[in-house]
Image: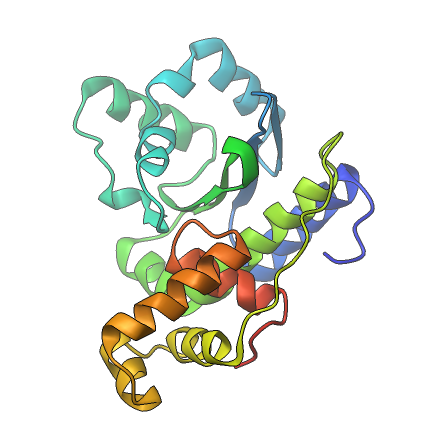
Amino acid sequence: MESADGLEDLQLLIEELRDEYGVDHIVYHWVNSAGEQYGCGTYDLEWVNHYIEKGYLRIDPVIQGCYQRFHPVNWKRLDWSSKSARAFLEDAIGHGIGNQGYSIPIRGPNGQFALFTMSHSCNDDEWEAFTISNRRDLILVAHSFNSKALEFEPGRTPEPAQPLSPREIEAMTLLAIGYSRAQAADTLSISEHTLRVYVESARHKLGAMNTTHAVAQALSRGVIVI
């Protein structure tokens, strides 16, 4: 990913990721600050054109559900109750998209919204086990992929990085290895309020929308190591 020189390299990379994880499809889709859209992925072009022609963007529960969320979303937990949503899902499965999906919403600078999605055909238990086992890595991959894609956005200037303080690094490291806020505060011998101050400061410096995003950014940039 670090050696990617353009959007074409990201397409090759996403195909390699699909094969590495052994899923049917992986797709990355973004809307930049100017409202322009870009995507790369492994969906068949026939489905992509069909999706556009049918105007599925207006009813796709994945798009609508992820736009309202910050955390990764298992498709089965979205609202598929409407007749149009169920018809859309049946059509997608018929085009080989798969009956399972996992999407990671990403918010970037200046109003950017992106999705990193995996889809596959398997039963619920298998998919649940896969997502639980790979959740942390998928979040890191998604945000790293988005960061690399942003480098290729025309006219974008790199944002200067702000270093984290030693206390901010300690707080983020404990959260990254799975500590609750209470456990992290106790380990550092500080109050939860003070811990929250450190976490919020780190989040702001990392340009993250929430704590999960901040942890992913810190790990992908090598700010913290676990």
Quarter occupied by the N terminus = bottom right
Where is residue 162 shown, x and y percent of the image?
61, 61
Residue drawn where x is 63% and y is 49% of the image? 147
Q: How many marks?
A: 0
Image point 43% across, 11% down: which residue? 54
| 223 over 51 or under it: above or below | below
Is residue 147 toward the left or the right of residue 174 in the image? Answer: right
- In front here: 218 or 18? 218
> Viewed as shown, does residue 213 lie left or right of 110?
left
User: Can you give x and y, in whole percent of width and height, for residue 61 in the image?
Assistant: 31, 30
Q: Quadrant of residue 55?
A: top left
The x and y percentages for residue 9 are 78, 45
Residue depicted at x 79% and y 50%: 4
Q: Residue furthest left?
A: 81
Q: Answer left or right for 73 relative to 35.
A: left
Indicate the position of residue 43 as horizontal and vertical percent values.
57, 34
- Residue at horizontal 23%, vertical 79%? 182
Out of 147 and 27, give the one closest to the viewer.
Answer: 147
